[in-house]
Image: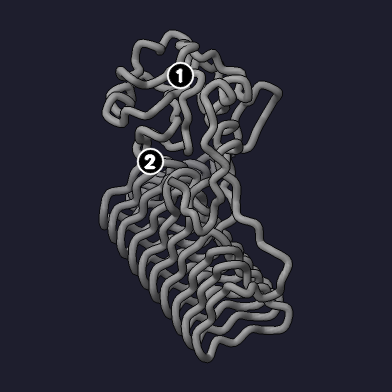
Amino acid sequence: MPDPRFFEDLGPAPLRELASLTGAELVDAGAGDRLVSRVAVLAHAGPDSITFLTDKRYAADLAEARPAACFVPRGAEALAPEGCAVLVAANPQGAYALAAQRLHRPRAAGTAAVAADSKLEDDVVLGAGAVVGPAVQIGRGTRIGPNTVIGPGVAIGRDCDIGPNVSIGFALVGDRVKVLAGARIGEPGFGATVGPKGLIDIPQLGRVIIQDGVSIGANTTVDRGAYDDTVIGENTKIDNLVQIAHNVRVGRNCVMAAHTGISGSVTIGDGAQFGGRAGVADHVTIGAGARVGAAAGCMKDIPAGETWGGMPARPIREWLKETAWLARMASRRAGGN
């Protein structure tokens, strides 16, 4: 269920309406009046939700979830468990995205500079031009810089320092967190798929969780989750101009130098370190205490405690040997000519 502090429910909606909206075929016309109130991925689906299946390998997860309804590709109708209404769609994920737009939307920011229902503890300092949205909570001793925008429902802990021109939305922020100028926290992650009339955005219905003692550098971006949360663990230090995509989970005491880019759904263990301009592909796991060299491009999992470098990244000794060998070969050929 999308967090009601950040998202407004627009449902329930009958399956007949969702089928018409998405261009899907409702296999059992008698289920047209069945109501669903939310969208959910398989891991979080339940009897009031509609989900989607794109890969037959996850049929067991669908059977375990037992949702009210499911978008499936043609030929996969039999994979739905008993009691689950089936909607056949050319692109089940695209149909899911359209259903999500029908059932949920972000809460409105309002028009007041400081919303009447926001709750600010003692000694909170608001800089000139700062905006505090509806139902925001800010803890004692926190400083909000000039022209910074705190979106609806956001909770910020005590003794935080939020710099100027920052935007924070869809986020729960712990104590003693520092966010430097221009950072963007909680914007929608990059997700698009094909709809009936072309590309459509996939609604990003997750949150950002920033734990105690985290530092986030200037102009860094931390996207909210698409389905689950994006999480930054305790005491992690993030430099300027870093990109952290949706559903990323960063452990405690991690370090990321400038221009690091972490793709969606990456999991990073405690104490991992990233040199400047390091990049990580989506769905990769970086083990606890692993180190990623500057400008390395990680395309696969890195075991705990190892140091990798190069592009594509590989164990550091292997990369250095290859680099040295190439340099020797190039020198020999140059000398031979």
Q: Place residue 213 in its image quadrant.
A: bottom left
- 105 left or right, relative to 235: right
At label 1, which amino acid type do we have?
Val
Q: Residue at x 44, y 30 (%)?
A: 51
Q: Place residue 164 in its image quadrant.
A: bottom right
| Residue 70 locus on image (x, y percent) | 43, 24
Q: Residue at x 34, y 51 (%)?
A: 286
Q: Which residue is mark 2?
A: 300
Towards the viewer: 97 or 294: 97
The secondary structure type at the circle numbered 2 is loop
Towards the viewer: 24 or 174: 24
Q: How would you rate the neighbour count of disc 1 (Cα within 10 Å): few for under 14, some for 14-19, many for 20 or more?
A: many
Residue 69 seen in the current view? yes
| Residue 38 locus on image (x, y percent) | 47, 38
At label 2, which amino acid type do we have?
Lys
- 232 left or right, relative to 110: left
User: Please, is residue 323 above or below residue 126 in the view?
Assistant: above
Q: Residue at x 67, y 30 (%)?
A: 199
Identify the mark at residue 72; answer none if there is no mark. Answer: 1
| Residue 132 locus on image (x, y percent) | 63, 73
Identify the mark at residue 286; answer none if there is no mark. Answer: none
In the picture, which quadrant includes the C terminus?
top right
Considering every residue shown, the one lying at the far bottom of the view is: 123
Q: How many discs mark residues in the rendered view?
A: 2
Residue 295 seen in the current view? no
State how far apart marks 2 and 1 are (Cα).
Answer: 30 Å
Q: Residue at x 59, y 24 (%)?
A: 17
The secondary structure type at the circle numbered 1 is strand
Nearer the observer, disc 2 or disc 1? Answer: 1
Towards the viewer: 157 or 191: 157
